[in-house]
Image (spheres, rainbow, N blue to C red):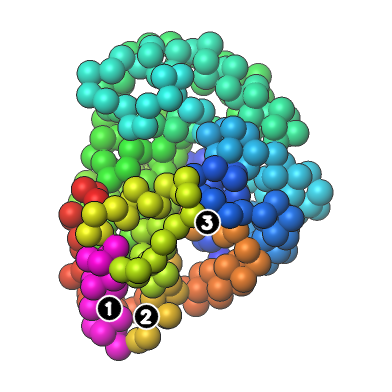
Amino acid sequence: MRYRTLGKTGLEVSELGFGAWGIGGMSWIGADDEESLRALRLAIDRGVNFLDTAYAYGDGHSEQLVGVAVRESEETVYVASKIPPKNMEWPARPGLRVEEAFPGDWVAACTERSLQNLGLETIDVQQLHVWSDEWVGQGDWLNSVDRLKRDGKIRFFGVSINDHQPENALRLVDTGLVDTVQVIYNVFDQSPEDALFPSVEAERVGVIARVPFDEGALAGSVRPDTTFPPGDFRTEYFSGGRKREAWRRVQAIAADLDVPVEQLAERALRFCLSHPAVSTVIPGMRSTRNVERNVAAAEAGPLGQRELAKLGAHRWVESQDG
């Protein structure tokens, strides 16, 4: 496993992180707690030292599982979590004041709740689960963040940028107040390269890249006839003609790279790791099988310029619209 510095935090984190949304038991349907714990333990054993969870992932269930794995490990493992907006709106609508989403007392109370779920004294990276650049200079959330740092409840602070809105955090990055940003970045949605990545590199802000497989499409596991369990968010995400169009595009990528569709997941993960602004990539890994595959892909390292140039031509801006 290779490691990179998480921006100005100075933390040396594994290039492959563990995205713990899928083990929360909600939105992603079908997770088994025992298999989730086996996956967490195996990931840590393989050198993964960065686990990203959130209270919203199963109302704290994901945090509880992550806490079990971290507390029983003798390795140094860094934990990132997220504070849900008080109004429970994802993403934040334009014009919303930050006091409606993240009042200072809510930031503090949610952090305490996450610490209880994790069974830890400190969260290494605490994040706001949505963000709007309209909030820069608003509210008392930052006072609460500073207090949590002084009290040793959190070490560093970041935000999870709204889906497919990488430019909606540029003002925050420029303030120097944020240690990390989490953003969707994959072969389809390459938009963080346009403005966000140059900005975070200039400010030494760590980047946590999420959704490297576009919820399974770039792994070749979503086809026109694919169905999802009742209640699974992917039913809505791949609604309309998106399954058919994503599959068409995935086949085109495989043909362009001259590889089987089954090998695209490896290329998709390595694509994310090829950008120097990225500190870690956090695919969901609900099974030991997925851990083994993703560890092998990460250990293969960044892609060569020839493949990167080919993948650069497969940007799909429309992916943000479903």
- The amino acid type of the residue labelled 3 equals Gly
| Left or right position of 15 against 304 | right
Tell us which disc is closer to us: 1 or 3: 1
Q: x, y (%) of residue 172?
A: 32, 30
Answer with the quarter of the image where residue 304 lies. Answer: bottom left
Q: Which residues are magenta?
A: 243-258
- The amino acid type of the residue labelled 1 equals Gln
Residue 252 magenta-highlighted: yes
**Dot 1 lies on which element?**
helix
Q: x, y (%) of residue 95?
A: 22, 18
Name the mark on residue 284: 3
CB under 8 Å between discs 2 and 3: no
Marked residue nearer the N-terminal end (1 or 3): 1
| Left or right position of 12 against 116 | left
Marked residue nearer the N-terminal end (1 or 2): 1
Residue situated in front as seen by the camera: 7 or 189: 189
Residue situated in front as seen by the camera: 268 or 251: 251
* Residue linked to disc 2: 261
| Left or right position of 219 against 254 | right
Residue in the picture at 53% in, 34% down: 56
CB under 8 Å between discs 1 and 2: yes
**Dot 2 lies on which element?**
helix
Q: x, y (%) of residue 225?
A: 35, 69
Q: Vertical placement of 105 versus 159: above or below? A: above
Q: Residues within 10 Å of mark 2 (few under 14, many from 20)?
A: some
Answer with the quarter of the image where residue 269 lies. Answer: bottom left
Q: Vertical placement of 140 versus 157: above or below? A: above
